[in-house]
Amino acid sequence: MMKIAFIGLGTMGKPMALNLHKAGFPLIVYNRSRERVKDFEALDAVQLASSPAEAASQAEIVITMLTDDAAVEQVYLGEQGLLSVCRGSADTGKPRIVVDCSTIYPVTSQKLAEQLASCGVTMLDAPVTGSEPQAIDGVLTFIVGGEREAYEACVPLFDAMGKKAVYMGASGAGANAKLANNMLVAANLAALAESLTMVQKSGGDPKLFLEVLAGGGGRSGMAEMKGPKILDRDFSAQFMTQLMFKDLKLAGRLAESLQVPVPMQASVQQIFQIACNSGWGAEDMSAIAKCYEAWTGATLGERK
């Protein structure tokens, strides 16, 4: 069975790697913070690496799941990074495929893919839809760009970590689609917070309103996943507000490069900016509902 290097054991990466282990794939794992590696120390068929280079040198396929462009570039281009292994001599171990599941700017992904290709290594951009609960349950959707042959070779890995993988096309196609997806997710969440606030202020029951949404055209993943969190005032992070804000900025940058007007994205980005400025950046993205509470004096979920 293919040996996999998994780099980045954060909120999403840790359960993804654990699901690969459950599926029987031998792993070598690396995370900058050693605290995140503890859950892997006692597992069979799992090795711990001291650097990205060490992990990559012993694996056929490398998967990275990192926070942002800067973190990805550090892991790929930094000292003891992936490229240092891929540029090694012919008798030095190196992977044949690198799969980046991070949400980053498509141009960054394409540049890294070009550098890896010059070393004979194929890169897929394969960001995911879903947050921590979906990662734990192994029901993520992978949005994949890159060479189809490499995509097909990685389908068993996607199946172990998710419920679906969609091949979008050439390098960067997965990254492009992920930013479009998150732009829509954020807009849905903001619309949900607005609607819940209006129901609350009018004296209605927002929990019953969620039942209304579930039965009509207003239903959405955000209403199902984040509606109860908002009304229960559970803002523990499944996907942090500051990460969605980062993604919205990337989406705006992509839209500008394509000369696509995105007035809704611009408005929603401002809401996420306000939430981050208010100190809620490390909370779940559903914490943007607190903006509406501050603006209206309502407390969502409070019974009158």
Image (cartoon, grey):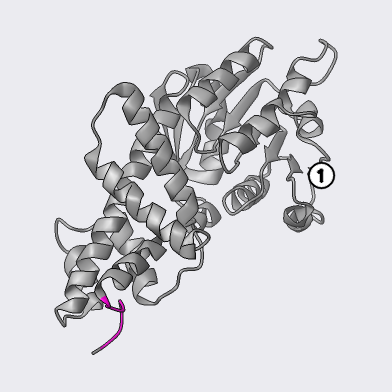
Residue 92, percent across and down?
A: 84, 17
Q: Is residue 1 visible?
A: no
Residue 28, percent across and down?
A: 76, 40
Q: Quadrant of residue 11?
A: bottom right
Q: Which residues are magenta?
A: 297-303
Q: Residue at x 56, y 39 (%)?
A: 68
Image quadrant containing the N terminus: top right
Q: Residue at x 69, y 40 (%)?
A: 7
* Vertical position of residue 200 compared to residue 257: above or below: below
Image quadrant containing the C terminus: bottom left
Q: Could you tell me which secondary element the residue under label 1 belongs to?
A: strand
Q: Quadrant of residue 35?
A: bottom right
Q: Is residue 109 visible?
A: yes
* Vertical position of residue 304 compared to residue 246: above or below: below
Residue 208 within the segment the image draws in magenta: no
Residue 64, percent across and down?
A: 63, 36
Q: Residue at x 41, y 60 (%)?
A: 275
Q: Residue at x 63, y 45 (%)?
A: 20
Q: How many marks?
A: 1
- Residue placed most toward the observer, 287 or 88: 287
Q: What residue is pinned by disc 1?
A: 48
Residue 269, percent across and down?
A: 35, 47
- Residue placed most toward the observer, 263 or 19: 263
Q: Main secondary structure of the magenta part?
A: loop
Name the residue type under label 1: Leu
Left or right: 151 as drawn, with respect to 176 = right
- Disc 1 residue crowd, few under 14, some 14–19, many 20+, Cα 10 Å: some
* Vertical position of residue 17 compared to residue 195: above or below: above
Residue 298 within the segment the image draws in magenta: yes
